[in-house]
Amino acid sequence: MTMTARRRVGALTAVGALIAAGLVAPASPVYADDSDLVVNGGFEAGLDGWFVNNGNATDSATLTPTDDA
C-alpha cells in the first residue's frame, strides 16, 4: 500500500469515526438544573443579593432603586 493510499484510508477512518460519534444518542435526555445560579437575577426582590463594583470596599458607589424604565 502506498503512502497516499494509507493517508486516504486513515482520513476515511477518522471521518467515519466522527460521523459515528455524532449519530450516537445520549442514554437519557439532559435537562437544566432547577436551582438558580444568580440570586435575584431579575431584581424581583429589590437590590437584595446585588453589590457595586464586585464588592470592592474602597468604592463609594451605591445602588439605588428607581421607577425609571
Image: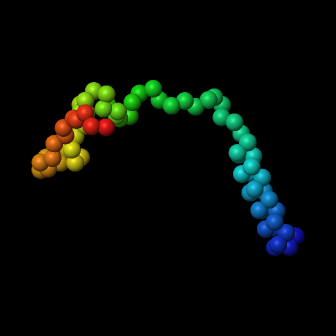
Residue at the (82%, 72%) spot, across then down: 4
Q: Is residue 35 above or below residue 69?
A: above
Residue at the (31%, 37%) spot, across then down: 69
Horizontally, residue 43 falls left or right of residue 65, namely right
In which quadrant will I find the N terminus?
Answer: bottom right
Figure disc tally: 0
Image location (x, y in percent) of residue 8? 81, 66
Horizontally, residue 49 falls left or right of residue 19, namely left
Which quarter of the picture shows residue 37? top left
- Furthest-bottom residue in this view: 3
Which quarter of the picture shows residue 68? top left
**Nearer-the-camera pick, 18 or 63:** 63
Q: Is residue 15 above or below residue 63?
A: below
Image location (x, y in percent) of residue 60? 12, 48
- Furthest-front residue in this view: 68
Horizontally, residue 37 falls left or right of residue 66, namely right
Image location (x, y in percent) of residue 26? 65, 34
- Furthest-right residue in this view: 1
Which quarter of the picture shows residue 44? top left
Residue at the (86%, 73%) spot, across then down: 2
Residue at the (73%, 42%) spot, across then down: 23
Image location (x, y in percent) of residue 59? 14, 50
Q: How is the image coloured?
A: rainbow
Q: Is residue 57 above or below residue 6?
A: above
